[in-house]
Amino acid sequence: MSSTFAIEAHDLRKRYGNSLALAGVDLSVPTGSVCGLLGPNGAGKTTAVRILTTLTKLDGGRAKVAGFDVAASPLEVRRRIGLAAQDATVDGLLTGLENLIMIGELHHLGRATARRRGEELLEQFSLADAGTKLAKEYSGGMRRRLDLAATLVAGPEVLFLDEPTTGLDPRGRNELWAVLDTLVDEGTTVLLTTQYLEEAERLADEIVVIDHGRVIARGDARHLKRQVGGDQLLIVPANPDDLSRVAAIVERVVGVRATIDLPTRRVMAPAASGAAAIASVATELVTAGIDVEDLGLHQPTLDDVFLTLTGTPAANDTPVAETTASVPEAEEVLR
Amino acid sequence: MTTETVPSASTPVTSTSPRTTATKSPELSPPGERRGSALGDMWVVARRGLLHMRREPEVLADATIQPVMFVLLFAYVFGGAISVPGGGSYREFLIGGIFAQTIVFGGTFGVAMAIAADRTNGAMDRFRSLPMAGSAVLGGHALANLLKALLPMAFMSVCGLIVGWRIHTDVLHAAAAYGLLVLFAFAMIWIGVLLGSSLATPQAVQGVAFVAIFPLTFVASTFVPTSTLPGVLKTFAEWNPVSSLSGSLRTLFGNPGAKAPAGAPWSLQHPVLYTVIASAVIIAVAAPIAIRQFQRSIAD
């Protein structure tokens, strides 16, 4: 593929009845890169994926995937993409191998090639032994792997994964991440949606944060986290009476403002210096004779990013929201 | 909202085996050069439908156990109280009716359930994201269920022979009877597609199909001669294609009760012709509506 961008979307708009699912989304995903679409439920992630995979018609804007316009040449787009929908849509009444062969045949690879591809992929996804079992007997993780294998049968140029790790246990998730690494190494372009900043950070070259059908930020994970204020130092004293003493120690040692959160009995503070801050705070706490239940770094979550970017009033257990930026400031990240 | 929300990305990925094998296959032909046909795609979907039936034999109950149950019920329980106009064995009269009933049930029910299931479990989206012919999903379901309708035809024939039903005509007439069943099954499939595309879930299909189809097969000459029915029901039964199909089969197989009573309407005087016309009308009217409804049900 000669084009620099595997996905180019301009001003995507979609309305369902009275609700605006997408209110003008722009996306450009360079060929061979991974784009993470990050947002809460109902943000418009799935709608965007459905439009780019030709399942849903656009109300406005235009999009090209693998060099073809999704509205004008849906068939050409479908030949070059793989889609793993939110619920693994493997066919429970077919065996793993039959599922893959069927997809391959519908990609017009021919039955023999489809079978060979199916066997290869079962092997790669550690499903070779389960290949002749009905997919309904698979575990959640196995279904996900089979679903992902199905998207790869015809060697797609662009892969769409809608919340690929939802419902997976940590092991299954790590396995899936590793498979994605391999794919990306081979040059496949991936667009994935997720609700977890950690996942987007682990997998994506660029993260696009969307909310209410709009892009509210984009950039790499470091960029987004810096906006939120980076890691937070978190200390839970064994005795709640020590909370103010702990806060004082933190402020003295690290030199930043510490926040006390009474309901969760913890002290939080921006931890720009990371491990060094933990070490010196720990030493001081021991010296002061304060018993600590938990002490560590708290990474910003999607919640934190959202609170910061959208300016939604913070819940009382999210001290980071004190640094909330106004929405116009957040929009600047787009440029 | 602390450390336990999502297992951290920094967790060492020790449990994963490095995958050195390429997930892409170099010998795949370029996407632009792959050519398929609508018929080929349709057959792939039909084969899937047939596999589903084999793996979930309970969905075949309407085509296997149900007709046998009706044969036994009417031949041995109610049959004694029903007399065939013009005389003859009630059991021989009965089989033509149960053939017709089985085709109506089998034709509508199976395809409606299959389409409703695919619409609710994400399979439609999977198909639509593939470069297959747009008509192949519907066509494949229709084909699989038409083939499925052949099963009870064989099943019912054997069952009939056991209880004393015979073909008294020749091969040509018998072949015409089976051909008529296939034609009628094809017409019923479009009603099934319409049901499966209109109702939200397989459960709804089951409920509505039962309520809508059951009376259609009973207010007819399926089990009793129409002459015994009162007023409006009698008129309905006389023009009900299920009656003309039952009558056609009795005529073509040479079974008792085939001859329409004096004063019976045209539909019963010429059952074969009327059945062919009725099938053609059902197909002409229901198929376009069903196809449109199906396309609407899977869009967006």
Image (tube, rainbow, N blue to C red):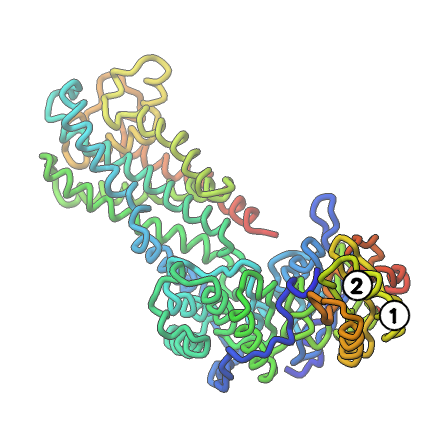
Please check whether the numbered discs 2 and 1 fall on a single chain.
yes
Q: Which mark is residue B81?
A: none
Above or below: residue A271 compared with residue A11: below
The residue that appears at 26% across and 48% down in the rendered structure is: B150
The residue that appears at 55% across and 75% down in the rendered structure is: A156
In-front residue for pair B159/A249: A249
In-front residue for pair A175/B252: A175
Q: Is residue B53 visible?
A: yes
- Quarter occupied by residue B271: top left
Above or below: residue A228 compared with residue A263: below
Q: Is residue A3 left or right of residue A218?
A: left
Instruction: Give the spatial CA distance, label 2 vs label 1.
Output: 11 Å
Q: Position of residue B157 (x, y in %)?
A: 17, 42
Q: Earlier in the sequence, mark 2 or mark 1?
A: 1
- Quarter occupied by residue A292: bottom right
- Disc 2 crowd rating (10 Å Cα; few below 14, some 14-19, many 20+) is many
Residue that carries the numbered disc 2 in the rendered image? A267
Q: Chain of mark 1?
A: A
Three-letter residue code for mark 1: Glu
Secondary structure category for the residue under label 1:
helix
Residue that carries the numbered disc 1 in the rendered image? A251
- Quarter occupied by residue A268: bottom right
For the residues bearing labels 2 and 1, Cβ distance under 8 angstroms: no
Q: Is residue A228 left or right of residue A40?
A: right
Quarter of the image where the N terminus of chain B is located: bottom right
The residue that appears at 89% across and 72% down in the rendered structure is: A252
Above or below: residue A279 compared with residue B196: below
The residue that appears at 31% across and 31% down in the rendered structure is: B242
Q: Chain of mark 2?
A: A
Q: Is residue B228 left or right of residue A163?
A: left
Three-letter residue code for mark 2: Val
